[in-house]
Image (spheres, rainbow, N blue to C red):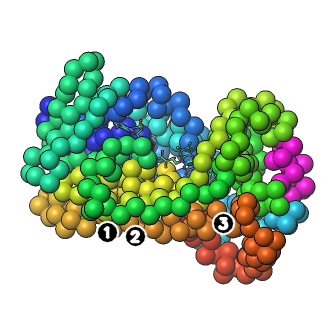
Amino acid sequence: MKTQVAIIGAGPAGSLLSLILHQRGIESIVIERQSKSYVLDRIRAGVLEWTSVELLESVGLGERLHKEGHRHDRVKIGWRGSEILDIEFQRLAGKPMMAYGQTKIQEDLYAAAERENLNIIFESSDVEIHDVTTDNPYVTFTTNGETQRVDCDYIAGCDGQHGVSRGAIPFKRRSEFERAYPFGWLGILSETPPLPELVYANHKNGFALCSERNPMLSRYYVQCPLEDTVDQWSDDRFWTELIERLPPSIGEHVVTGPSIEKSIAPLRSQVIEPMQYGKMFLAGDAAHIVPPTGAKGLNLAIADVHYLTEALVEHYAGNSAKLDSYSETALRRVWSSVRFSWWMTVLLHRFPEETAFEQRMREEDLAYLTRSESARKSVAEQYVGLDY
Ligand code: FAS
Ligand code: PHB
């Protein structure tokens, strides 16, 4: 097969990239390891920066997003047991954010792929990248027991944190920056009405987060030790611990119920530099991982796709400047979001080895945010996302 851009991975980054390139007249083929239903069953991100909302609108994905999404003008942070900090990002940063689950975004992207007849090849294995430093790169893979080959002008590595693309950059040409956090997030879904606002909490027992997927589907998280397993967390234990970590005036409104999904995810910060090598470009989790505390993972993937599609469209129109500087451009936002996600994670979690001094410093940070509107404005503009 031959195409202009061979895309590895049909998660949000790969499927959005293929859709926008198609709409701008550039052909692509997407090669995905899993089945379509497997990708759609994954529970991941929950909130969109307004820049992400506007980009999805611009490619025709705004209708269901505005119908089923829930716009939020603020988030609350509970701390020191009963204190409540209000980050009013609409008032302070002039933008809201949208609660709309990644699962729905993936459904919308696959529906658009069907409508626009995109070429996504699911259940492909043994994907290999070849000759990225030549003018004739290509990708090989196996599907239905047969080896296939896609000749292309460019390769987009959108295959997430466990993909093969990042490995196509030679070890001595690649820099990896990483921090693993000494705790995980235990997340549940319950068919109960969510709280009216997203609520983060720092408590002496650890972090908690109250979010949503729709008016009758709530998403909650509590920080847990890395070695914990889901079996150690009955629903009762989860609800008791979640409510314990919230200020009483908020916790008393949590509607509990049976969990319909329960999982533990580790937290990591990671950046791969550069995000391009020869004719290959990395986008999304293939290039960077952030702890979900700052709600940046999916939004960064969408931002990378914005920069890469702009660069490819201008290249095919005769100007390669943006393509040559894609990595430098994308990494500016990546590092800004990686820092914010790290900062929010340190601000709101309890670290196993820390002393009472560190928790006191944390509470002083939260007290300063409570007193200072300019400090809250800084958090607000980073949370809702800076303009591209
Ligand atoms: P993805 O990982 O979504 O997609 C990569 C695709 O490539 C996958 O479909 C995979 O099957 C495919 N692939 C992998 N290797 C391949 C190969 N060799 N060949 C072909 N295909 C291959 N972000 C938030 O903002 N908030 C959250 O709460 C949140 N929770 C998360 C929970 C978990 C458990 C995980 C893993 C991530 C979470 N994230 C969260 C981050 C998540 O939303 C990612 O940022 C987002 O999925 C990134 O999209 P992609 O870059 O497309 O990567
Ligand atoms: C979610 O709804 O899954 C969610 C919301 C905010 C975060 C992380 C996850 O910071």
User: Does residue 252 show up magenta in the picture?
Assistant: yes
Q: Residues within 10 Å of mark 1 (few under 14, many from 20)?
A: some
Q: Of helix, strand and loop, which one carries label 2?
A: helix
Q: Is residue 118 above or below residue 194?
A: above
Q: Of helix, strand and loop, which one carries label 1?
A: helix
* Image coords of residue 235 (percent x, y): 80, 34
Which residue is located at x 48 percent, y 69 percent?
Answer: 336
Instruction: Identify the main secondary structure in magenta.
Output: helix
In this rendering, would 345 be left or right of 249? left
* Image coords of residue 28 (percent x, y): 23, 40
Q: Which span of residues is magenta-colored? A: 239-255
- Foreground: disc 3 or disc 2: 3
Which residue is under mark 2? 332
Which residue is under mark 1? 328
Q: Nearer the viewer, residue 304 or 72?
A: 304
Tags 1 and 2 touching, CB below 8 Å: yes
Which residue is under mark 3? 346
Q: CB of residue at label 3: within 8 Å of ligand 2?
A: no
Q: Is residue 169 above or below residue 330?
A: above
Q: Residues within 10 Å of mark 3 (few under 14, many from 20)?
A: some
Q: Nearer the viewer, residue 289 or 319?
A: 289
Q: Amino acid at mark 3?
A: Val
Q: Amino acid at mark 2?
A: Arg
Q: Residues within 10 Å of mark 2 (few under 14, many from 20)?
A: few
Tell me which numbered mark, 3 or 2, is placed earlier along the sequence. Answer: 2
